[in-house]
Image (cartoon, helix red, strand yellow):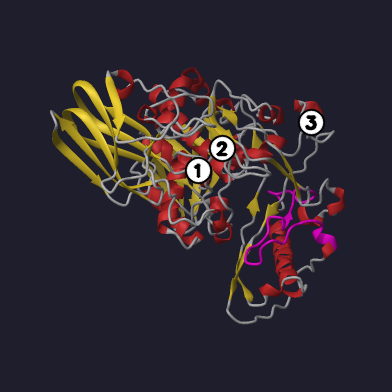
Amino acid sequence: MMKTIEKHYDFVVVGGGMSGICAAISAARNGVKTAFVHDRPVLGGNASSEVRVGVNGAGRTTPVAFKNAIESGVILELMLRNKKVNPQYSFNVMDNVSWEMVIEEKNIDLYLNTSMQTAHVENNKIVSIDAFQNTTWKTFRLYADLFADNTGDANLAYESGADWTMGREGKDVYGESLAPDVSDNHTMGSTILYTARDTGKPVKFTRPSWAYEITDDILGRRNVHEVSNGYWWVEVGGDDLNTIENAEDIRDELLKYAYGAFDYVKNSGKFPHAENYALDWIGSVPGKRESRRVYGDYVLNQNDIDAARIFDDAVAYGGWSMDDHTIGGIRAKWEAHKKGHGSVWNPVDDLYTIPHRCIYSRNIENLYVGGRCLSVSHMALSSTRVIGTCAVIGQAIGTSAAIAKKYGIMPRQVNEHISELQQLLLKDDAFLPGIETKDSEDLISNTKCTITASSYKEGAEPHKANGAYARRIEEEENKWISQPMSKDGEWLQVQFDKPTKINEILLRFDPNFSKYFATRITDSKRNNEEMQAELVRDYKIELIKDCKVLKEILVDDNFVRVNHHKFDSITCDTVKIIVLKTYGDESARIDDIRIYAQ
């Protein structure tokens, strides 16, 4: 007989893609006891080894990439860690990087291979969910005050009775210029990718009898730009094939088209350099772009993106183009689409923010919604759906849950504490365009002290390492940058006007927010450095009083942006940071320094 095991938590996150990972980790780090439920054996969702989509966001878009726009916070930590241990761009290794970051958190209980099946709801609140773990044949009943749906398909929202929609809104709904004239139930489709490798000798490929033949007429202007990787335009669904109800049929169709695409590469005669290539992996889990979306108190739409709105309750941001894929994907006649490439990349002129009112259900009081299923229109989703953007939305959800727990309130009531939420996000290294850091606990900002350095470049003076933003904004560096480093390194120091008791130092280094983080070897040409060259590798901290070093902290082989140093309280008059080595840049760089006496 199947066992039912009851567990109680503060917060239950369902869905283990990047949005769910960031939600669970950010909640746990802020003291929230969290159950993390995922129905696959590996974490990562579309970014996992099961699907293998790159982590795109505001910093890599079409037709232009915004400068200084790469997402920070939990997702940046994961990407830096992956870059350090995974120079071979293995998605399987990246799976374990994601898993490792989750299991390191003592406030997270991880349930892999566990499918949410039922939501128990009373008075418009989820009381518990039932989830079945197919590897142990156990059913878990998980109780919590707060829940988050990061499933992509809004499965928890659907089961709990949350208001949702699916399809494209017509122009009359939100007044979007890019919307169809009339609302319909069409969505963007799903994709299966493949990888091929050079075997070092000619390899023949025979298209299976069940696979489709890909012709130039079918391709239209779709770009066959790379022989070793699959193609995003191998896309099916969203027309008469519903991306949820017909998911199994869509997968089968995608396999037929994916094998056909590789046959085209091998046998069309247009790619002689593919002669030695053989299929190495082909996906069995389609990467889904769109399905259900849950209504919140606000629906982000194209007009907000066009206006680059900075909402008063901003908790995340985006910048990917409104990348609206052809309905039906490769099954649609390419001539029927505006440009015949398989998608239209409608430009986004500037970064836009995502309000807190979009990340919770309007009618299920204790339900957060993130990832693809947050409260946005179809046109807005065409921008917000990419993984980097979903990740920062996830961090916003987890951090909001911490505020909700602190005050014993529901997600909607967190709006009354929005400034506190925003400042906590910034402290946890999120970036919110237009929202400045106001750290009342930072001794540098709130006591008399001076910041000096061994050297600096014009526009990157020492005091800029403690400001309103911890990254470059347009032409403002918002960091200290030294002159080319001497053999003994370069230093920045904070000198208090009187001896001061401290017990924590927070440092943020520069990972260069304009450099793309490749997770696929085919993208590595965008940035194939061992590590971001600007990042500090080796450094030393000295706590000084009356010219005497009381404590020294030495860090070798650093690979993260944010470094927290906590220690027993020490009374000192000077804190000195000596940068000894970077990953290649000639200058030392510190984006931010904060000092606390907690």
* Residue interval drawn in magenta: 217-245
Tell me, yes or no, whether the two marked residues, 2 and 1, touch with CB atoms within 8 Å: yes
Which amino acid, by three-letter code, is at mark 2? Gly
Q: Which residue is drawn at 76% across and 33% down?
A: 169
- The secondary structure type at the circle numbered 1 is helix
Label 2: few (<14), some (14–19) or many (≥20) C-alpha neighbours in 10 Å: many
Report how far apart the C-alphas of labels 2 and 3 lie in the structure. Answer: 26 Å
Q: Nearer the viewer, residue 140 or 597?
A: 597
Q: Mark 3 sits on what residue?
A: 177
Question: Going by the picture, which residue comes out furthest to the right?
Answer: 335
- Mark number, residue 20: 1
Q: Does the magenta stretch include residue 178?
A: no
- The secondary structure type at the circle numbered 2 is loop
Which amino acid, by three-letter code, is at mark 1? Gly
Q: Mark 2, mark 3: which one is toward the viewer? A: 3
Where does the image place residue 290, in percent across and percent down from the top left? 67, 44
Label 1: few (<14), some (14–19) or many (≥20) C-alpha neighbours in 10 Å: many
Eyeballing the image, is 245 above or below 230?
Answer: above
